[in-house]
Amino acid sequence: MRDELMNISLECIASSLPEGIDAALIISNTNRKYFTDFTSSAGYLIVTRKDAFLLVDFRYGEAAKEKAAGCNVIVFENLRSCLRDLIDETGIKTIMLEGSAFTINEAERIDRFIAGTGAETVKSSELDDIIGRMRIIKTADETANIIEAQRITEKALADTLKLVKEGVAEKDIALELEYRMRKYGAEGISFDLIVIAGKKTSMPHGVPGNYRIKPGDFITFDIGALYNGYHSDMTRTYALGYADEKQKRVYQIVYEAQQKGIEAVRAGVKCCDVDSAAREYIYQSGFEGFFGHSVGHGVGLDIHELPAVSSSSETVLQSGMVITIEPGIYLPGEFGVRIEDMVSVTADGCIDLAAMPKELIIL
């Protein structure tokens, strides 16, 4: 039935199926995109040891047949009938579900659909682990998409900074950033953009609001663009008009902590050791208790994905991983500073994917 060879990623899944498992059923948007390079908000990807089938409804049929790679596209009118026919044709007896993507209701629905066919579903995290090990290493094309998302982000930020002045509201800056990202080629934003100023910068995930920027405020930009399904993630902290000595000192500590984190990155190093390199510098500088999140995370089709660059992560870095390094200091009721770059891990270090200056800039 196969009308084209499976791509390398699908072949990897097929060859990784555990003994006794005939097929994998993948339904998450990001994993369908990863394996077929086709973006949709619904669909069912079934991978057997010999073939791959993308099941979509009428809404996506034409586009999937044109763009989906490495799989047979089946446009269904009734999912139950489609699944039963496919099981009968391929002889599938055991189907492993993508555990993190299936709700209890959705898993029960699939069980009802295939009842009586002789096939059964296997519900575990094993398929997620297999996919996670694949996605944690980025191909050259994936890294290129992340870099392009980063360049769009930087271009939009550089333009938007020219508009930052006293009296401008946080939410208006955030809207301007999103507009410019889309103008420069982004499909959307990586996440709800964080543009906060003044005392709100002490909240790592503060929400842009009606606060109007004043001289002496720090302004945090935690931003990213989406390009061809891939995310960028960058944080910069600026000051409007001036910064006092305490602000400058805290900024410099975060800047140096981030450098130490980046310098610790290379293949063969544990993620917890990268976290420690940045964290211990902040703690030793007198700010223990004011840095409460991990130093970083993986970035790709999801804004947060493996590996976790945290104090508890024993994951060993490998060449091709793309991670963030984002230490911060947050002083409640005063201000906060965070600096974040994405880096691509190499055998002897890493490549910083960000080109925006990191030294303190007074706007």
Image: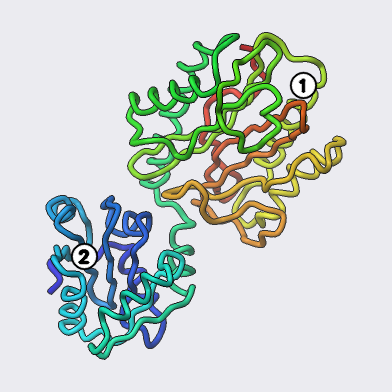
- Residue 189 placement: quadrant: top left
Q: What secondary structure is found at the residue carrying circle 2?
A: strand
Q: In percent of the image, x 77 and y 26: which residue is there?
A: 334
Circle nearer the N terminus (2, 1)? 2
Task: Indicate the position of residue 10 as horizontal and vertical percent values.
Answer: 31, 66
Q: Which one is nearer the viewer's eye here, 145 or 56?
A: 56
Task: Please state the horizontal and vertical placement of residue 254, each as a whole percent of the image.
Answer: 73, 32
Crowd rating for badge 1 (residues with CA inside 10 Å; few <14, some 14–19, many 20+): some
Residue 122: horizontal and vertical position, in percent?
40, 81
Residue at 34% over, 63% down: 27
Q: Is residue 324 above or below residue 305?
A: above
Q: Amino acid at mark 1?
A: Gln
In the image, residue 267 lies at what x, y percent?
59, 53
Horizontal side of 103 relative to 341 (left or right) equals: left
| The N terminus sits in image quarter | bottom left
Say which of 248 and 189 sits in front: 189
Name which residue type carries label 2: Leu
> Which residue position is annotated with label 1?
247
Residue at figure coordinates x 43%, y 78% from the top left: 123
- SS for callout 1: helix
Residue at 19% across, 82% down? 90
User: Mark 2 sits on what residue?
Assistant: 55
The image shows residue 18, relative to residue 198, as above or below, that is: below
Lateral position of residue 359 relative to residue 289, left or right: left
